[in-house]
Image (cartoon, coloured by chain):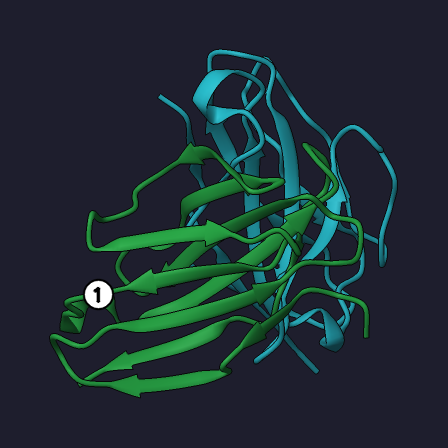
Chain colours: A green, B cyan
Amino acid sequence: DSGVTQTPKHLITATGQRVTLRCSPRSGDLSVYWYQQSLDQGLQFLIQYYNGEERAKGNILERFSAQQFPDLHSELNLSSLELGDSALYFCASSPYNNEQFFGPGTRLTVL
Amino acid sequence: AQRVTQPEKLLSVFKGAPVELKCNYSYSGSPELFWYVQYSRQRLQLLLRHISRESIKGFTADLNKGETSFHLKKPFAQEEDSAMYYCALKGDRGSTLGRLYFGRGTQLTVWP
């Protein structure tokens, strides 16, 4: 499968902890986007990277950060976790400003 | 400000009946509109984009700039159409360029 992959699939952790979510884009895609899907907020754009550089920022908390590495994979770091951070986190990739292809998501549960 | 509104959280129809999922948007520029579908426990998949004007799985959607709407329609619903449908807008300028703004989604259930 040459689509977008995300690891881990599920993550259960405690409040105050820090986790890292990983995303591998489709082969050749330079743009990576992160989205959060929660019951109360719906699907919200968090941040975009293009070829290693941050391009756009959405409703991303200061406790969250991301980066895109030279091999184009991306990581989303969530720290000082709160109960409200429990959500499904999607990564998407695209060649540039074209159709975005979504990964299967990482379900984060904060207890 | 950019916003996508899907007024119906839930929509149920019987198999073979027509279905219309509503989407309205607000955006000051020239947005690109999309419909994404999410089947149970699967990833979001692109269903339609307004610029391609194609029909996928029998679904069509027309961008109405006057009414700022992009409703999704299918003349004869099938049980396999049951899924969550998201309308999305892609910005065309500045900080909105490339990012998707999603509606809250409509859960479509097609009964046999």
Q: Secondary structure at mark 1?
A: loop
The N terminus of chain B sits in image quarter: top left
Q: Quadrant of the C terminus of chain B?
A: bottom right
Point out residue B34 in the picture as x, y percentages from the top left corner.
Answer: 65, 40
In the picture, measured across the screen, residue A18 lies left or right of residue A51, that is left
Along the line of sight, the residue nearer the viewer: B85 or A105: A105
Q: Is residue B86 above or below residue B89?
A: below
Numbered circles on residues, count: 1
Q: Tell me residue B66's x, y (percent).
A: 58, 13
Identify the residue under disc 1: A79
Q: Residue furthest front?
A: A70
Residue B109 position, x and y percent, is: 58, 72
Question: As shown in the figure, which amino acid type bears the numbered disc 1?
Answer: Ser
- Relative to B97, residue A4 above or below: below
**For residue A85, side relative to residue A67 (left or right):** left
The residue closer to the viewer here, A103 or B81, is A103
Residue located 38% across and 36% down the image = A57
Q: Which is nearer the eye, A65 or A60?
A: A65
Q: The numbered mark 1 sits on a residue in which chain? A: A
Position of residue B16 in the picture relative to residue B97 (left or right): right
Q: Quadrant of residue A14?
A: bottom left
Coordinates of residue B108 in the picture (x, y in percent): 57, 65
**Residue B72 at least partly seen:** yes
Measuring 62% from the left and 51% from the top, which residue is drawn there? A70
Left or right of A1, for residue B111: left
Q: In the figure, A102 relative to A86: above or below? A: above
Q: What residue lies at 85% left-to-right and 52% top-to-bottom? A: B56
Q: Callout 1: 10 Å neighbours few (<14), some, many (20+)? A: some
Does any portion of residue B102 appear in the rendered image? no
